[in-house]
Amino acid sequence: MCGREKHERTRTTSWGRRGAPHRIDARRDACEQNPITAPRPAAVVVSGPAPRVVPRAHEPRAKPMKIPPAAHRAALVLALLAIVAFRIVAFVPKAPPASPTPQAFSVDLAAAHVAHLAAAPRPPGTSGHDAAQELIRAELTRLGIPVEIQRATALGTHWGVPYDGARVENLVARLPGRERGPALALVAHYDSVPNAPGAADDASGVAVLLETARALRAGPALRKDVIFLFTDAEEAGVLGGNVFVREHPSFRDIGLVLNFDARGTRGPVGLIETSADAGALVRHFADAAPDPVATSLFPEIARRLGHQTDFFPFRQAGVPGMNFAAADGAAHYHSPVDAPAHLDRRTLAHAGTLATSLARRFGDLELTTLAAEPVVYFDVPGLGLIVYGRAWAMPIAMIPAALFAFALLSAVRRGQARPARVLAGFGVLLASLVLAAGLAAGFVAALRALAPVWGVFRGDPFDPGLARIALALLGVAVFAAAHRFFRARLSPFELALGAASAWLLLAFVTAALLPGASFLFALPLAASLAGLLVWQRRPAPQSPSSGLWLLLSALPALVLVVPVPYLLFVALGLPRAAPAVAVVVLLAGLLAPLFEVFGAGASRKPALGLAAAFVVTLGLAVVTNPFSPARPRPACLAYAFDADRREAVWTTTEDKPTPWTTLHIPEATRRAARFSLPDQGTLRYEAEAPPLDLPPPQFEALGDTIHEGIRTLRFRLRSGRSAPFVLVSVTSEAPLRGATIDGRRVDEPSAFRATAAEPWGFTFQGLPAEGIEGSIDLAPGAPVTVRVVDRTYALPEQLLRAPIPADVMLMPFRIAGSTFVAAERTFGPGP
């Protein structure tokens, strides 16, 4: 209050506790400050001729601000939405050039390779697998690059029993450089899962390597050799990559590895994983990569999700490297619609330009000089990749800490906030976050239960974009409602500082424990607090100019944080949408001052509008995702024949069988599944089927001996119908000590008790016609039962009651579309 007004009181205002009115006669002039930002004077009450001074209220008032005109608010909202949209659209890869130079990556040539490779599924032991191998060999031979085939048996124990075995055939080619020394390796796998043509996963990676080889061959020789490794049996448990790292002599020559894979058919190709302390690699990547999409958050997520690609054995062996993948369009992943027609050419071009540019950069470097350095990095549209040492994570976190302390002290001194109420503001954000994440999980679970278009997929439906937007709107709506409700009790600065305190806590936690993610909290928070410090001192904090200032100070948050919910939606899928929605609420909390300018503190309309937008968008997400030939409904049907009992069944993993599945497993005659396929999916129902005269798999005993208290049962295993896949399950009361499978030894760290509920066993892909040999070691004195199930990747067409409809596809993962034949043998307690 201006000094000359102190004794000229003619108006009434409310300054009291929780907005309770105290009458004050006062005349205001042009020097009057805004009541929200002005320092709190002592309240003066006139009750007669002599004024009485009343001590200042101890709680900041919670009167809603005067909001700017609707046109100004609309302009600010549109500007905010435009920034968000720009940041999301920046993820869309650029269209490839129409006529690339001979030394540049050609998406047309790469797409032609994809079309040939993805003509059929390519699991080991199939004709599609053989055709893909022949295409790779022919193309490299045409380029004058010699090709070697590494044939070996691989056995993977990482995922436990049943162990994963296969006969693998890796293809290894080397493009010579000008000098000797550590080589650069480019890696992709050429096999696929049984039900998928594998256009994206990973024919796209194979095509990228072939086209990169052509582009490099067309230019001057690089300084170092480039090894092109096409691995086999990646889908069976990274078996080809593991056996290459363990046994191939070229592995010792590799100084750097770049792996290209895919979990989706569209979107940017991101740097999803690096070797430890890959600072030098990341800096070269930042300089050489066109349109880089990378943050040091990705490796933190990848390591915790436990996903494995061919990059895994190289990283475990300590080889420096980087792992690239596209992940959007996950409904096509491992499914029959992972076909060339659904692979986005822009995604293929992005992968190709990355591979070609990085091969030229790293192929001309002395790879032994790449120093290990832990770094934090993130991409910014227009600026490329920002990189700084991880040692700066904690000092950078100190910057928002200092700004927060200054803002809090200033707000307390001005009477705009109290520390206890700031803590309450922290609680508002935390409660909003928990509520929004819970509601998102609940809505998704309900839709998956009620709407087949959502429930039949493990992750996203074919077009999840509207659903992602709806869930983001839900998060913002929950925060807006909480902001409006508690705004009657807390000042805007208490709400803003409460949210900032949550961000500050996350900034310190990530700087200490998860430094690769620290930039997400420290940098946006510092900018937002700087904006808050200016805002609390402006004479008209509700004005359009104040709103523009707040929007500018929110730019780092919008640029750095807006991509995170999108990336979490892509990485985790809609069934695990809660983390993405939680990040949306965190971002909304940081933008709390903007909510005040938008009128969310003074009116319920913004929250109600956001809630209505959520309902409408979610409804559109459901009704615009119908099944069609382009977006077929997954269905699971398999034929299983027990050769010992001469009984056959149709079986399924579907909880709610589709109409086509129900033709074979009618509801009236179906029963709970009794046919067992350990580790091949949970069978739900089965119904009797006509038995076919299919030859059983054979488990032939070659010897049964006891030596030093260990019984060794030697065997030969083969399929009577040349099936490429076999599953072996062993049960016995005698503890199992280990086994040898096609020459590969596995020892159990402790005696394995193989029961009917938890049998010991292994799978084997690429089973040769002559079969394989092996042995099982166990304690003597108890019978041993061996159950063998072989698998071919087709249904018996003569038994189908109707062909698969055009708008139905075989369900991704595991057993759909296969024929199984089982046989069992029991051996006595031993000699």
Image (cartoon, rainbow, N blue to C red):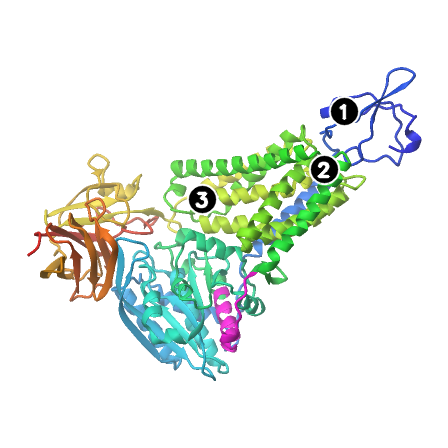
Callouts 2 and 3 close, C-beta under 8 Å:
no
- Quadrant for the C terminus, please: bottom left
Separation of marks 2 and 1 at Cα, in angstroms: 30 Å
* Residue 375: image location, x then y, percent: 56, 61
Nearer-N-terminus badge (1/3): 1
Separation of marks 2 and 3 at Cα, in angstroms: 37 Å
Q: Categorize mark 1 by other alpha carbons within 10 Å: few (<14), some (14-19), many (20+).
A: some
Q: Of tags 1 and 3, which is closer to the observer?
A: 1
Q: Amino acid at mark 2?
A: Ala
In-image side of 560 versus 692 (left or right): right
Q: Amino acid at mark 3?
A: Arg
Nearer-N-terminus badge (2/3): 2
Q: Determine which quarter of the picture holds residue 283.
A: bottom right
Q: Main secondary structure of the magenta part?
A: helix
Q: Of tags 2 and 3, which is closer to the observer?
A: 3
Callouts 2 and 1 close, C-beta under 8 Å:
no
* Residue 529: image location, x then y, percent: 69, 46
- Magenta segment: does it hold 450? no
Q: Which labelled disc corresponds to residue 16?
A: 1
Q: In the current view of this chain or complex, which residue is farthest to the bottom? A: 178
- Magenta segment: does it hold 367? yes
Please name the residue shown 24% across and 36% down the image.
Answer: 667
Q: Of tags 2 and 1, which is closer to the observer?
A: 1
Q: Amino acid at mark 1?
A: Gly
Residue 349 appears in the figure = yes
| Residue beneath disc 2 | 70
* Residue 353: image location, x then y, percent: 51, 69
Q: Categorize mark 3 by other alpha carbons within 10 Å: few (<14), some (14-19), many (20+).
A: some
Q: Determine which quarter of the picture holds residue 312.
A: bottom left
Highlighted magenta segment, given as a residue range? 350-375
| Residue beneath disc 3 | 576
Residue 83 appears in the figure = no
